[in-house]
Image (spheres, rainbow, N blue to C red):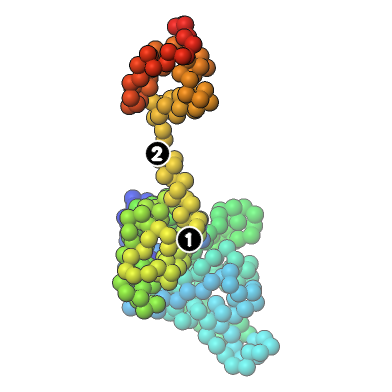
Amino acid sequence: MSELVARSEAMREAVRLAGRVAATDANVLVTGESGAGKDALAQHLHAESPRAAGPFVRIDCAALPAELLEAELFGYERGAFTGATSAKPGRLEAAHKGTLVLDEIAHLPRDAQAKLLRVIERREFERLGGRKTVKVDARLLALTNVDLDDAVRRRAFREDLFYRLNVVRIHVPPLRERREDVGPLAEKFLALYAAKHGRPARRFDARALAALGAYEFPGNVRELANVVERAVIVSDGREVFEKDLPEAVRAAAALGARRARRPTLAELEAEYIGEVLAAARGNKSEAARVLGISRKNLYERLARQGGQTVRQASDVNEKPVTDG
């Protein structure tokens, strides 16, 4: 199931740009926070491209040590290093006539960056330990959650490779900046995880959806998926309630409700007068003195607040307060 939902204008703009670029063979740099949906956009780019029938291959540059990453990307010949008992093609060869996604491209070692630049410029490379030139035709999509411009300035990333990859840049906004997408994404994950865990089809009640919409989701779409999977597991019946969501989500909903419902000036005044009356043990003359108003004014304010009109005669034992 695709995680690509574009109800929000910010995400629609990213998808529109992806649609225009997909028909070309240009390399694309996809930026965005971790878990924001860069992989989903990369899959969309591939599916809408002339290479859609070809392989879609992904490699996570942050998941492997430098020496293993290079071997995994470019492949190796027998005897290239200790343990290389047979030759093995790399991800580049596997992506021939298709698309290669280089996730977390900033973690690619400098040596591998130079080899990748050659692939872009000449469409060829050699496996580790090999001399035979391998021809390859693969579109490159580079994903990053860091500022590659800054990495270039720090000389942590090759400038020439950066410009080759950054032909078109598409930014995937974080989930907190596209809250319109939270509900549709949550519904998709709900169906997915209900089927995965063999549970009846479920739906969110209104308060649960509102709570999801109020939460910031620092982990973005990936965190939303985890929250929904948990809700599917812990919920009873066919409906997911606010109580089935993690404490962090419920707390954000409660805070949002308090911020959304700000008291009016009249409500604040009524609350303050009530506190003064309580401190004066119901003595309206004393309460009026503390409030700095006349007793008549106090009666009028109490009447406006919806309370019963109290006749001054009922307070015959109270000491009058001079209007001022």
- Residue 103 image position (x, y, % from top left): 51, 68
* Residue farthest bottom in this picture: 85
Using the image, determine if residue 211 lies above or below residue 100: above
Return the residue nearer the eye: 231 or 119. Answer: 231
The kind of residue tagged 2 is Arg
Return the residue nearer the eye: 276 or 177. Answer: 276
Please give the residue where the numbered disc 1 appears in the rendered image. 246
Using the image, determine if residue 16 lies above or below residue 232: above
Return the residue nearer the eye: 205 or 148. Answer: 205
Q: Can you see residue 73?
A: yes
Judging from the image, what secondary structure is the residue with disc 2 in?
loop
Q: Residues within 10 Å of mark 2 (few under 14, many from 20)?
A: few
**Rendered image quadrant of residue 323:** top left
- Residue 203 image position (x, y, % from top left): 31, 65
Mark 1 to mark 2 CA distance (whole Å): 23 Å
Please give the residue where the numbered disc 2 appears in the rendered image. 261
Return the residue nearer the eye: 266 or 214. Answer: 266
The kind of residue tagged 1 is Pro
Q: Is residue 62 left or right of residue 11?
A: right
- Residue 191 image position (x, y, % from top left): 33, 70
* Residue farthest right in this picture: 82
Q: Is residue 153 left or right of residue 232?
A: right
Query: Which residue is depicted at the point 47% across and 9% down?
Result: 320
